[in-house]
Image (cartoon, rainbow, N blue to C red):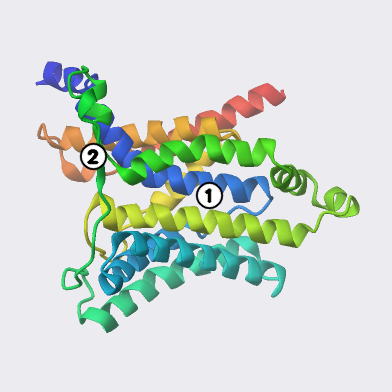
Amino acid sequence: MWHNLLTHLGGGLFLAATLRVSTPVLFAALGALISDRAGVINIGIEGIMLAGAFAGVVGSAFTGNAWLGLLTAIVVGGALGAALSGAVHWLKADLILSGIALNLACASGTVLLLFALTGDKGMSGSLPSKVLPNIDLPFLDRVPVLGTAFGHQHVLTWASLAAVPLVSLLLMRTPFGLRLRAVGENAEAAAIAGVRVARVQFLALVLSGALGGIAGAFLSMGYVSWFTGGMSAGRGFIAIAAEVMGGGLALGTFVSALVLGAAEAFATDLQGIGLPSELMQTVPYIVPVVALVLHAARRRATAA
């Protein structure tokens, strides 16, 4: 039994599952990276993912088009990022408390809207929502491991992989990225140099929210084909952990998201061999806690 499990972990099916499970975490982690480099960590990314998942389902159901559903999720995510920025910069609210309030509002608001639209507080099964497609690469079918892992992946999984170098280029090779990093490192010095700090942080939170919306859309239009209350299930907080573990770099964030995705895929496999499901469901949450403890210890050792 254990031999078969170890063989499976080295195969294409496990890699495919890891990529699929990592997709929403990676999108949200890249969003958290953008806002964090601007000095405004997006604690509300969990709620934004949940709102994006709901918006994708409703948008695709009412338009009859999955891509318009995705666009709806992106717009809603960006709008919530803008709302978080407004609370911080114009209403002078605390960033962390505003993010927590956003999470609570999205958790309850999506269930309320779901009930208003369908009369059901559980799931959106009565809505004729659409799903985004997979991208099939038949020429990979004969390639061991890679064919199984990459031959039939979801379009948003490929988009998440493409987003890694794009976010890296945005942060490291563009004037906006330079201003964004300057604001995050020293907002007062950036303001003296003529950078409009509030504007840069506003745009960072909007971009962060948009990526969170895509992450949520994958949950309801790719991972499954419906919305249910609380379906983000803490992935937004796991994404923040992945961003911290990534050391402020897009590539590091990608590797961290893959590690955390592999932990979740591994926990699912362990359930299949008879281990208690309640115990295995804790694995995706224990791993980032342990990883963050080790990360903090390494940083302290480096500073010493």
Side of 193 relative to 158 (left or right): right
Nearest the eye: 91 or 173: 173
Q: In which quarter of the image is residue 199?
A: bottom right
* Residue 174, visible in the rendered structure: yes
Name the residue tied to disc 2: 280
103, above or below 296, in the image:
below
- Three-letter amino acid code at disc 1? Gly
* Front label number (2 vs 1): 1
**Looking at the picture, how far across and down is residue 214, in whole percent?**
41, 54
Q: Nearer the viewer, residue 144 or 90?
A: 144
Q: In this view, does 101 lie to the left or right of 49?
A: right
Numbered tag placed on residue 260 in the rendering: none
Q: Where is residue 236 in the image (x, y as percent from the top left)?
A: 43, 52
Task: Judge left or right: residue 143 versus residue 68.
Answer: left
> Could you say where residue 115 lies in the image, as x and y percent from the top left?
26, 80
17 vs 127: above or below? above
Provide the secondary structure element on which disc 1 rests. Answer: helix
Residue at 52% across, 69% down: 101
Query: What SS does tag 2 mark?
Result: helix
Quick check: can you spot residue 284? no
Distance from disc 2 to disc 1, alpha carbons, whole Å, reads: 28 Å
Where is residue 205 shown, x and y percent of the image?
60, 58
Q: Which residue does the image show at 23% across and 39% down from the upper left?
A: 280
Q: Which residue is rendered at x = 19% and y = 70% of the image?
A: 128
Q: Do the residues labelled 2 and 1 touch (CB within 8 Å)?
A: no
Mark found first going from the N terminus, 2 or 1:
1
Q: Which of 163 and 122 is in front in this view?
A: 163
The three-letter amino acid code for the residue at tag 2 is Met
Quadrant into which the C terminus falls:
top right
Residue that label 1 marks: 31
